[in-house]
Image (spheres, rainbow, N blue to C red):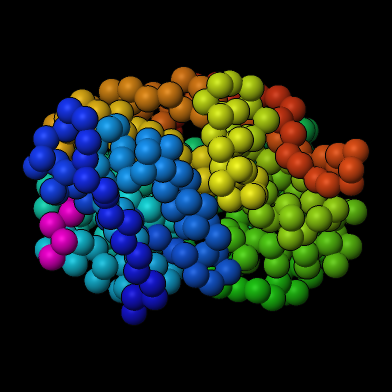
């Protein structure tokens, strides 16, 4: 069921663009999770994308008029497939983006790329499409799922932990997450647990952690389920007994606001943080805060970078021609808020990973502070199998 639909239509083009462009803006299909406990993830990606368009004078990317067609998938693969089918067949959209969750990406990416359209992922990076099933029209601007959680495994090593209790939501990204953590963690896994994707009561899991007495807990529960997990971990008194490590989805700015001081002591692997000291990052953070009166999350940063990458390609191509856009997108000729950005052979990022910690500021508020680098120029384990 389609839960929401918003059209952001382009104004008439001015300047050197042709009348044809003014009459027919490039349509971008944006399907994302915008409602429910995880809805803020898609909202942040959408809002950053819209901000990029607004900063070009309104409804433009790379100087080209665009129309963003926004749909809420409601975290339902069936709904996502219906939306994308209409995007491709009725709306004649040739560029699709916005997807948050990997099981939704798995359900729709083949439908998009098999028609010759482009899929630009601002978040989901399932292992399925990173290796042998990679595709020339599939680009990921966040991470490959495993590589994201490899940062947490490397971080646990750096902190000296010898055994870990691991938990993740039972869907594609959760399985990739555990695989990634285990790939780089050098210690022993004392127990491996998979929870329901929409689970909010973790009492049984807390009891198992207490009984196992690990050196560290690693967990991956995105959105509202992650907030519930962290709160219940503290309520069980485990945060004072057993430290926790994770990757970006474990602790973003929204999670930090929700759990407050119980986040103190967590260690997280990230590819970008709001305190990065480069012009693009500073400009984005200031603009996002001014527009939306909130600190941008990692997800917002990924939405921004995806929009900037598309803008750079549109600036050269001037249309939604998929083959020409793909050729420009491969060059990654845009300025990322992360700093230098490049693709591996499977069109997933090769990037640095950093350790961040929650800190209490002088006014009593909490923020995430970057304290050091974990991995440099890190790609993913599947790129070697991609033959484009």
Left or right? Give the position of 269 relative to 340.
right
Q: Is residue 92 magenta?
A: yes
Q: Nearer the viewer, residue 48 or 346?
A: 48
Highlighted magenta segment, given as a residue range: 90-94
Residue 282 can be seen, yes or no: yes
Q: Position of residue 148 (x, y in %)?
A: 53, 40
Q: Quadrant of residue 222?
A: bottom right
**Residue drawn at x 49%, y 70% as measured from the top left:** 35
Q: Give me the residue at 90% from left, 54% from top.
A: 240
Above/below status of 388 relative to 8 = above
Query: Which of the 4 image quarters holds residue 313?
Result: top left
**Image x and y of residue 237, in percent:** 89, 62
Look at the image and say whether residue 383 sits in the magenta stretch: no
Residue 248 position, x and y percent, is 60, 45
The front one of 323 and 132 is 323
Q: Is residue 166 visible?
A: no
**Looking at this rendering, what residue extends furthest in the left direction?**
20
Answer with left or right where residue 266 lies relative to residue 93: right
């Amino acid at each position: 069921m389609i839960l929401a639909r918003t059209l952001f239509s382009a104004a008439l083009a001015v300047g050197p663009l042709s009348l044809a462009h003014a009459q027919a803006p490039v349509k971008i299909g944006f399907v994302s999770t915008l409602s429910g406990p995880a809805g803020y993830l898609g909202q942040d990606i959408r809002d950053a994308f819209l901000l990029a368009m607004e900063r070009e004078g309104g409804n433009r990317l790379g100087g080209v008029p665009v129309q963003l067609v926004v749909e809420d998938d409601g975290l339902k693969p069936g709904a996502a497939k219906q939306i994308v089918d209409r995007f491709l067949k009725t709306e004649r959209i040739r560029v699709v983006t916005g997807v948050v969750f990997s099981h939704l990406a798995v359900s729709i990416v083949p439908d998009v790329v098999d028609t010759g359209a482009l899929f630009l992922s601002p978040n989901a990076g399932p292992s399925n499409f990173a290796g042998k099933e990679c595709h020339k029209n599939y680009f990921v601007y966040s991470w490959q799922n495993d590589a994201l959680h490899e940062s947490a495994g490397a971080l646990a090593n750096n902190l000296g932990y010898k055994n870990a209790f691991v938990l993740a939501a039972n869907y594609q990204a959760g399985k990739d997450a555990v695989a990634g953590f285990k790939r780089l963690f050098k210690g022993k896994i004392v127990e491996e647990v998979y929870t329901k994707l929409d689970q909010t009561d973790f009492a049984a899991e807390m009891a198992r952690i207490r009984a196992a007495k690990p050196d560290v807990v690693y967990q991956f529960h995105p959105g509202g389920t992650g907030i519930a997990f962290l709160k219940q971990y503290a309520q069980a008194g485990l945060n004072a007994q057993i430290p926790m490590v994770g990757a970006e989805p474990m602790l973003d700015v929204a999670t930090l606001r929700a759990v407050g001081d119980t986040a103190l002591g967590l260690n997280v692997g990230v590819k970008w943080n709001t305190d990065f000291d480069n012009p693009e990052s500073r400009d984005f953070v200031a603009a996002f805060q001014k527009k939306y009166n909130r600190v941008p999350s990692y997800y917002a940063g990924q939405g921004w970078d995806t929009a900037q990458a598309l803008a750079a390609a549109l600036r050269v191509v001037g249309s939604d021609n998929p083959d020409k856009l793909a050729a420009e997108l491969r060059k990654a000729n845009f300025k990322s808020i992360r700093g230098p950005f490049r693709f591996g052979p499977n069109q997933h990022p090769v990037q640095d990973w950093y350790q961040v910690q929650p800190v209490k500021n002088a006014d009593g508020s909490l923020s995430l502070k970057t304290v050091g680098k974990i991995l440099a120029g890190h790609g993913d384990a599947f790129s070697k199998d991609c033959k484009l």
